Amino acid sequence: MTHFDLFSLAPSVDLDVAALEAQHRKLAMESHPDRVADPHARRLAAERSAALNDAIKVLKDPVRRAFYVLELKGVKLDSDQAAAKVKMPMDFLEEIMEQREQLEAVKARRNLEEAHAMAAKMHALRDETLARARDALRKDDVPTATTALGRVRYYTRFLEEVDAFEEELAS
């Protein structure tokens, strides 16, 4: 059973998140373990509740949802082994490496403002690339979606590194 099946939805990168959250609340109330007295039924309700919570985390996030839809089409990019099979263009990899080196220099200078400026540019690239991936998934163009989401992984890792730097400075 897929995350989409739990909510009686067709797999898609396009979802009404507000409606999804409302449906989640309704289903979570119906399957809450505290509403069941029988121990076996309580365990099943707890499992369903956990599955609903996992599903909502994936489906309400457009990035995670795109990766999940791609996974349903047979490509699991969330594993390092699968990601290694995606051949990224050398110029893209060189650009990312250069950006990471610049970020390391910014971190060495402890310049959070400059890191935020770099993150803003990377965020824009991630959003633009995610839009291309979602469009490709709508058209069932798995190769294009795979390459685009491979790029999204690199952008996301960069942004996570900026977040970690910010947390480091805050502590």
Image: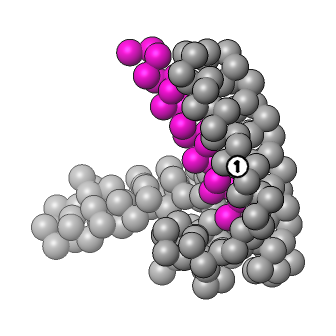
For image coordinates 86% across by 78% down, the residue present is 139
For image coordinates 80% across by 59% down, the residue present is 91
Q: Residues within 10 Å of mark 1 (few under 14, many from 20)?
A: some
Task: Tell me the kind of residue under disc 1.
Answer: Ile
The relative height of residue 45 versus residue 10 in the rendered view (above or below) is above
**In this orientation, does residue 15 appear?**
no
Is residue 160 in the magenta section?
Answer: yes
The residue singled out by tag 1 in the image is 96
Q: Does residue 64 appear left or right of residue 88 in this picture?
A: left
Dominant SS in magenta: helix
Residue 70 location in percent, x, y? Answer: 66, 74
The relative height of residue 164 versus residue 72 in the rendered view (above or below) is above
For image coordinates 63% across by 61% down, the residue present is 65
Residue 19 location in percent, x, y? Answer: 67, 52
The coloring applied to the image is: one colour
Q: Does residue 41 appear left or right of residue 119 in this picture?
A: left
**In this orientation, does residue 70 appear?**
yes
Is residue 50 in the magenta section?
Answer: no
The relative height of residue 111 versus residue 117 in the rendered view (above or below) is above
Q: Which residues are magenta?
A: 150-171
Residue 116 location in percent, x, y? Answer: 68, 24
Question: Which of the 4 image quarters holds residue 89?
Answer: bottom right
Residue 25 vs residue 74, the one in the foreground:
74
Residue 167 location in percent, x, y? Answer: 46, 23
Residue 39 vs residue 73, the one in the foreground:
73
For image coordinates 57% across by 73% down, the residue present is 84
Furthest residue toward bottom: 74
Q: Secondary structure at mark 1?
A: helix
